[in-house]
Image (tube, helix red, strand yellow):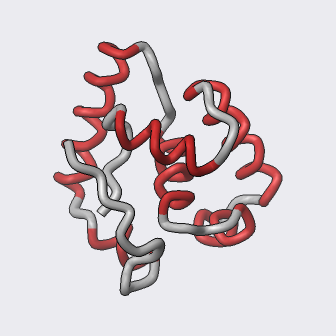
Amino acid sequence: MEISFGSALPAESPRASLSALSHETESALASIAKELEAMIGVSLSARERTIVLLMGHGLTNKMIARQLSIAPETVKSHAKSIFWKLAVQTRAQAVYRASTLGLIALQ
């Protein structure tokens, strides 16, 4: 699997990028993620996968909170859980690990 971190942000807004995913694609990715999680023993909730994906697009906690209509402290809580589950210490490490494990697909 080749990983590209070309540009930090897509040409369109992250909301438009997320909206562009079809329901079938989301379902397929969720199914693949569940299979991989079972194989590798790492499990991220759908919300955690969304947050780490948005981190990968360069959004701050505050921007992620606005995007998802949740409090910034909730994003921080999810981030801590993500870091613990992936055994990492930084956002970049979390994005890289989630991507290499197939939990998210950066485009």
Residue at the image position 38 percent from the left and 43 percent from the top: 99
Residue at the image position 78 percent from the left and 59 percent from the top: 72
User: Residue 75 or 6: which is nearer the viewer?
Assistant: 6
Q: Going by the image, does 46 lie left or right of 30? A: right
Q: Compared with residue 41, is residue 79 higher up or lower down, i.e. above or below?
A: below
Q: Going by the image, does 15 lie left or right of 65? A: left
Looking at the rendered structure, the number of numbered marks drawn on it comes to: 0
Q: Compared with residue 87, is residue 51 higher up or lower down, i.e. above or below?
A: below
Image quadrant occupied by the N terminus: top left
Q: Position of residue 96 (x, y in %)?
A: 46, 44
- The single residue placed furthest to the bottom in the displayed view is 11
Q: Going by the image, does 82 lie left or right of 1? A: right
Image quadrant occupied by the C terminus: bottom left
Q: Position of residue 22 (x, y in %)?
A: 22, 62
Residue at the image position 17 percent from the left and 52 percent from the top: 24
User: Residue 92 or 51: which is nearer the viewer?
Assistant: 92
Q: Position of residue 9 (x, y in %)?
A: 45, 76
